[in-house]
Amino acid sequence: MLSVPSEYWIDRVPFDKSHPAHPFRGKTYTFDQMVELRKDENLGAQVQPDVRQERYDRCQKAIREIGDVWESAKPDVGVVVGNDQMEVFTKEHVPALAIFSGAYVEGQPRTPEYLAKLPPGIARAELDRTPADYTEWPCMPELGSHLIAQSTRERFDVAQLTKLPTGEVGSNAAPHAYGFVYRRIMRDKVLPNVPVFVNTFYPPNQPVAARCFAFGRALGRAIAAWDSDKTVGLIASGGLSHFVVDEAFDRSMIDAFCKNDEAALSAIPESMFQSGTSEIKNWIVVAGAMAEAGLKMTMADYVPCYRSEAGTGSGMGFAYWR
């Protein structure tokens, strides 16, 4: 929804209607059940063309602001915390935590054959997170190896990657959680970086929220201990609530992030971190690192983006720590 004009958001609604189990506040519902459950919220008004356009415009403005913050900070190295959606892993191998220590990750242009196999509404977004030509996005193996070693000493058993494997969707390229950051936040001026993978989506080995915060603290300590004078910037990639928008939950998360409230973040039950909403755990990892650094979060914008009267869509959050 960040990558396609607002008039195309509704292209995903047929998928929403066919999905048998939308997670929402600890339970799952069909599309029609969600419509009935949320009928008093008048969500139909939220999906009118003018509202969708206003929300899209706010999102694009916030992306530009976050890109400006990144650029003005002038980091030498990046650490990008995201998750894979079977773009590089498969059901035969899904690590709970993984850190990349290779020289580069690949940006693969999408072929017409690849795009044709994607679900409705997805192919149009691919150009926003993949390059037009084959690209080797630079990484920082020295820092990656250091983070692996330090994390292991702190009893986090992370998988190490020096090359991205080919996942179930048939691509060994950087997953969209990273490609979007490289293209839209780093603006194709990709710094040497370390991709960090958190399994937010796939049971049974998703790290719980408290573990994610503790892992973030460990990363913060490891970065501080790195024998280098380079400035390191961290990026959390992922949405807030989706694929059903829950504004109340999103705002409670934002409040906890702004307060560096480790106890509140750690106490949220795993049932709330299902489907796309689980990507908040990427934020929790970076929040842990920022707490270790003693930094406070500034909210740039929160934009609830709906695409149906059932409340499907994405809660979009944009924030930074300086």
Image (cartoon, rainbow, N blue to C red):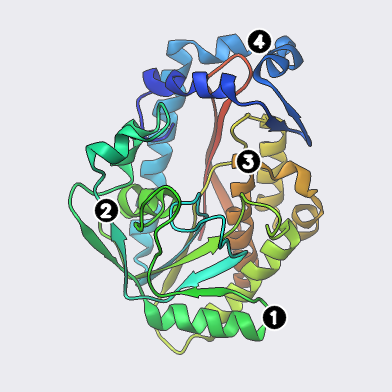
Q: Mark 1 vs mark 4: which is more N-terminal? A: 4
How far apart are the two marked residues, 1 and 3, measured between alpha carbons? 27 Å
Eye-nearest disc, 1 or 4: 1
The residue under label 1 is 155
Q: Can you say whether 38 is above or below 290 in the image?
A: above
**Foreground label between 3 and 4:** 3
Disc 3: which residue: 275
Residue at the spot 44% in from the left edge and 57% down from the top edge: 88
Disc ID at residue 42: 4
168 relative to 191 in the view: left or right: right
* Category of crowding for the residue at label 2, using alpha-carbon neighbours closer than 10 angstroms: few (below 14), some (14–19), many (at least 20): some
Label 3 vs 4, first from the N-terminus:
4
Q: Earlier in the sequence, mark 2 or mark 3?
A: 2
Question: Which dot, 1 or 2, sits closer to the camera?
Answer: 2
Q: Which kind of residue does numbered mark 4 sit on?
A: Asn
Q: Amino acid at mark 1?
A: Arg
Measure the alpha-carbon separation of dots 4 and 2. 42 Å
Disc on the earlier residue, 1 or 3: 1
Label 2, secondary structure: give it.
Answer: loop
In this view, the residue in front, 36 or 190, is 36
Q: Secondary structure at mark 4?
A: loop
Circle number at residue 108: 2
Position of 278 with respect to 98 (left or right) is right
Amino acid at pointer 3: Ser
Label 1 neighbourhood size at 10 Å, few (<14), some (14-19), many (20+)?
A: few
Q: Is residue 52 above or below residue 273?
A: above
Q: Residue at x 44, y 34 (%)?
A: 59
